Every structure is written in C-alpha cells, then in structure tokens.
Image (spheres, rainbow, N blue to C red):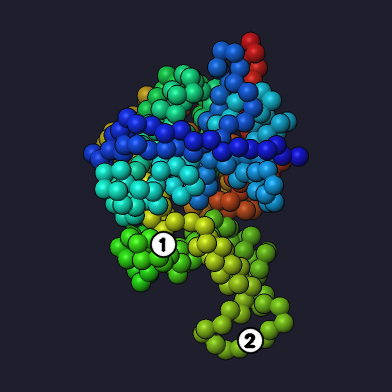
C-alpha cells in the first residue's frame, strides 16, 4: 500500500549561476519528501530523476487514481529504500515541466513566457540547485544520493561537485557520458520537434498550439531505445492488430508494435513540454566529467570520496554495462569503495524502473548497510 505524497515548492531569490555563463533568478523548485529526518539530520537520501520523470518519486496523490510515483516500487515503508529509516527527497529539475521553473514560466526580466529563451541547463547546474534546496532544508550531508539513467549522472556529479556532502552514491543504468550513438538518437528526436510547424522557434505558447507531431515522434524514437529487442519480440513480435489482415498500405497502422508506439507518443505529447525535451536531452549530451581532465575518467573521479553502488542491466544497450564498468574501473583506480552488480534482465534500459528480485535485493542490501552505519 502506498502512502499519500504532497508536492512542496521553494522559491529562491538569489540568482543561480549556470555553466553556460547565464544565470537564473527568481526560480522555484518543486520537491517531495518521504519519511522523517532524524535528530542529527544524517539519514537524508536525495533521488535524482531521469528525462521524463519528476519530483513525484513515491507514494500516490490523494484522490487521484494511478498516481504512483515513478520509483514507488523502490521507495517507501519496508521497501528497498525504506522511508521508515530514511528521509527521502525528490526534486524536479530546473527546465522541467512538472512544477520547477522552466520554459513554460514567465521570465522575470522580460515579463514574457521563457519559451526558447530559457537558458540551457546542465547536470552540474541541477546539482547546484539541489544543493541550495538541501541548504534551505538544513541538510548538510546526504546519507546517499541515487538515480537511474540521467538521474545516475546527477548522482555521480554530486560526488564530484560536493564530495564532502555525500557518503554514498547509488548510480543505476547510467554512464560517464553519452556515446555518439546516444547523442545521435537525441538529435533525431530534437529535429522532429523543431521541424514541427507548430514549434514556432520554441515560442509556440504565444500561438496557442503545441508541437504534438514532433513530440510524438521524439517519444517513439526514445521508447524504441529503452526496450530490448527480446522484450519487443516477446511482447509484440510480428503480430498484427486484432481483427485486421495485411492491407498492403504505407499509411495504416497494421502491426501491434506500431499501435503501441503511436499510443506512447500520443500520451507523451499530452503532458510533456517540447522545450523541456530539448533542454533535458541537451543536458544529457553535455555531461562529461572527464572532459576537463584530458578525457581521463580516473582523473575526473579522483575528487570523489563517497562509497558507491553501481548497477547495470545486461540488455540495456542505451546505457550498457560496459559504461558502468568504466566508472567502476576509474573509481577502483582511485582506490574508492565500490560495489557493482550486473543484472541479467531482459527488459533493456527500462529495467531500472521495474521489479526484479535480484536488483531490488542488491539495492535493499546496500541501504541496509547504510542504515546500520547510521545506527552505529
């Protein structure tokens, strides 16, 4: 049974300097907390979200059906990250479309909706904003920071930007940077959006339209990369939609996989913001802590002092196990404490969101050890 979650909001007047050289002033962060902060404020766990997720990590909203948080199977009373022992914080990233300041909000400098004028934000910028929120909540040190995919990049960045504030980092289905193939998928998705006639250079709000065609295609491309070939074949194979025969047409939806992708694209286009999609995929592209160290990940991770758990999944070709092993090797080169689990799971990249007994067991065991540390 899930608990009831309540969104909270905090506004910051002091400008946030961004990596691009721009700054953001008068911004708001949406967040949620679960569990109770202990007396010495040492049991806080920050959860960082991936591309289309939000601060609503766990629990349900009162009176709303099917409103479970995106990691509700992982976080809650008696779950792998037990909210009876830990104080869990989920924060919506700047530039998102789920409550924190983003392209859909008014620019205080111009009095107009930001739209395409919202500054480019990076993983490092998000971490800086999260650190300010923790300051305001009176949390100096995190028991752990965790995330999957893009959230895992943020967790890794926390250990480099604020090494003294993180005791453990849990990095799931992530990578130290994107491969050229990953950047290419992101670029194709962005082109689908910006070439939609309803995009209007990112200022579509003023025209009262939404570039839904582009968003649909972007989501369909993304969804293909999140699933493994095995799962697609098992779930859909070459099955035709119910009650139809081959029509020998280039226009109709005939195969079940086509119907599924159209459904996912339609659903996504109803709730996600096009400018947010551009911003977040760009943040993914830019993340590369080794860049400032001549490409040496070992040199980049020398700053990290926390202990690590890394988890990867065998069929995840978007963020393959080899990428997690790069991080593990760089940490071991620096003689850091690292636990690593490579889960043989058929679900592709989406496996980090799903129930797998081995995966949940690994995370649960790791957080058990953190809880014992806190109790010692």
Q: Name the residue rendered at 38%, 55% in the picture.
A: 275
Q: Residue furthest front?
A: 111
> Residue at 57% of width from left, 57% of height from top?
227
**Residue drawn at (32%, 30%) of the image:** 14
| Local SS, label 2 | loop
Report the front residue among 327 and 254: 254
Mark 1 closeness class: few <14, some 14–19, many ≥20 residues within 10 Å = many
Res. 176 image quadrant: top left
Tell me, yes or no, if residue 171 can be seen here.
no
On the picture, is 129 further left or further right than 33?
left
Residue 57 point in image, percent of width and height = 59, 40
Measuring from the top left, give residue 259's x and y in whole percent: 60, 72
At horizontal 60% and vertical 45% (from top left) the residue drawn is 70
The 10 Å Cα crowd at callout 2, few under 14, some 14 to 19, many 20 or more, is few
Q: State which mark lies toward you, 2 or 1.
A: 1
Q: CA distance from mark 2 to mark 1?
A: 29 Å
Q: Count the marks: how many?
A: 2
- Residue 367 in the image: above or below residue 257: above
Asked if residue 348 can be seen in this view, the reply is yes
- The N terminus appears in which quarter of the rendering? top right
Residue 202 position, x and y percent, is: 33, 60
Where is residue 146 drawn, in percent x and y? 53, 33
> Along the polypeptide, which appears first: circle 2 or circle 1?
1
Q: Secondary structure at mark 1?
A: helix
> Does residue 127 sit above or below 70 in this rendering?
above
- Looking at this rendering, what residue extends furthest in the left direction? 21
Residue hosting label 1? 189
Mark 2, residue position: 246
- Label of residue 99 in the image: none
Which quarter of the rendering shows the C terminus? top right
């Amino acid at each position: 049974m899930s608990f009831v979650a309540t969104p909270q909001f905090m506004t910051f007047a002091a400008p946030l300097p961004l990596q691009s050289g721009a700054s953001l002033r008068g911004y708001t962060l949406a967040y949620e907390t679960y569990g109770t902060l202990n007396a010495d404020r040492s049991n806080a766990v920050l959860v960082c979200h991936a591309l289309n997720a939000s601060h609503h990590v766990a629990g349900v909203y009162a009176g709303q059906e099917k409103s479970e948080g995106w990691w509700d199977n992982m976080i809650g009373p008696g779950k792998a990250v037990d909210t009876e022992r830990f104080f869990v914080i989920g924060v919506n990233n700047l530039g998102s479309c789920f409550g924190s300041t983003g392209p859909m909000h008014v620019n205080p400098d111009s009095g107009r909706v930001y739209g395409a004028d919202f500054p480019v934000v990076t993983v490092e910028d998000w971490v800086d904003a999260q650190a300010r929120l923790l300051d305001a909540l009176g949390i100096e040190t995190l028991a752990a920071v965790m995330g999957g995919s893009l959230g895992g990049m943020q967790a890794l960045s926390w250990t480099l930007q604020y090494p003294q504030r993180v005791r453990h980092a849990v990095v799931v289905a992530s990578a130290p940077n994107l491969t050229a193939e990953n950047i290419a998928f992101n670029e194709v998705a962005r082109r689908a959006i910006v070439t939609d006639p309803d995009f209007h250079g990112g200022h579509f709000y003023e025209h009262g339209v939404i570039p839904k065609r582009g968003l649909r295609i972007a989501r369909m491309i993304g969804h293909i990369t999140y699933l493994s070939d095995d799962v697609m074949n098992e779930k859909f194979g070459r099955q035709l939609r119910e009650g139809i025969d081959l029509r020998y047409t280039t226009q109709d939806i005939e195969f079940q996989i086509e119907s599924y992708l159209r459904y996912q694209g339609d659903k996504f286009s109803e709730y996600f913001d096009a400018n947010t999609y551009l911003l977040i995929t760009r943040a993914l592209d830019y993340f590369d802590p080794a860049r400032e160290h001549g490409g040496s990940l070992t040199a980049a991770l020398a700053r990290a002092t926390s202990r690590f758990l890394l988890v990867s999944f065998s069929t995840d070709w978007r963020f393959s196990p080899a990428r997690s092993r790069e991080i593990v090797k760089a940490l071991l080169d620096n003689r850091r404490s690292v636990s690593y689990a490579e889960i043989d799971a058929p679900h592709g990249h989406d496996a980090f969101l799903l129930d797998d007994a081995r995966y949940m067991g690994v995370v649960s065991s790791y957080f058990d050890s953190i809880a014992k540390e806190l109790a010692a």
